[in-house]
Amino acid sequence: QVQLVESGGGLVQPGGSLRLSCAASGFTFSNYAMSWYRQAPGKERELVATITSTGDSTNYADSVKGRFTISRDNAKNTVYLQMNSLKPEDTAVYYCNARNSVFRAISYWGQGTQVTVSS
């Protein structure tokens, strides 16, 4: 069955770094654009970063540009989110999403990983 399993979340001080990973299985990973979303308490889920199926293009929310980097390894069926210069406002549950590059209605979600930025 389809699985997206996030890992790498945790508690970090402001200015620190974390690297999130999302391991995919049960579908053809290289046919899917991958994204990271986040949802803070009391707020709507927001798109953080997206990478195309081939990895040749990325997009970022303005709030994370220059601090976060999304990447993927199609050989390992894994997508990453490197988060640097973290701020308290980055605190949220981070979710991995896969969307089929052709049949865009086909989309899968992970269960989320908590990131807390606090001193």
Image (cartoon, grey):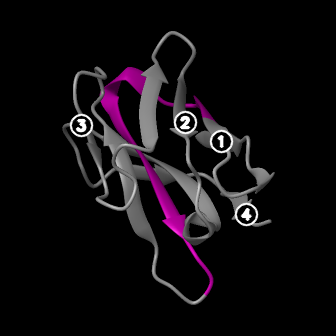
Q: Quadrant of residue 100?
A: top left
The answer to the question of whether label 2 and label 1 lie on touching residues, with beta carbons closer than 8 A, is yes
What is the span of residues highlighted in magenta in the rendered image?
22-41
Three-letter amino acid code of the residue under disc 2: Gln
Residue 61 pos. (x, y %): 31, 57
> What SS does tag 1 mark?
loop
**In the drawing, does residue 31 fall left or right of residue 9?**
left
Residue position marked by numbered label 1 in the rendering: 17
Q: Residue at x 75, y 56 (%)?
A: 13
Residue 32 pos. (x, y %): 34, 34
Comparing 118 with 33, the one in front is: 118
Q: CA distance from mark 1 to mark 3?
A: 30 Å
Residue position marked by numbered label 3 in the rendering: 101
Q: Which mark is residue 116?
A: 4
In magenta segment, residue 15: no
Q: Which mark is residue 82?
A: 2
Q: Nearer the N terminus, badge 2 or badge 1? A: 1
Three-letter amino acid code of the residue under disc 4: Thr
Mark 1 crowdedness (10 Å alpha carbons): few <14, some 14-19, many ≥20: some
In magenta segment, residue 30: yes
**In the drawing, does residue 79 fall left or right of residue 60?**
right
Whether residue 23 is situated above or below residue 110 in the rendered picture: above
Q: Residue at x 41, y 68 (%)?
A: 46
Three-letter amino acid code of the residue under disc 1: Ser
The answer to whether residue 28 shows anywhere in this view is no
* Labels 4, 1: front one: 1
Q: Nearer the N terminus, badge 2 or badge 3? A: 2
Q: CA distance from mark 4 to mark 2?
A: 15 Å
The answer to the question of whether label 4 and label 2 lie on touching residues, with beta carbons closer than 8 A, is no
Q: Nearer the N terminus, badge 4 or badge 2? A: 2
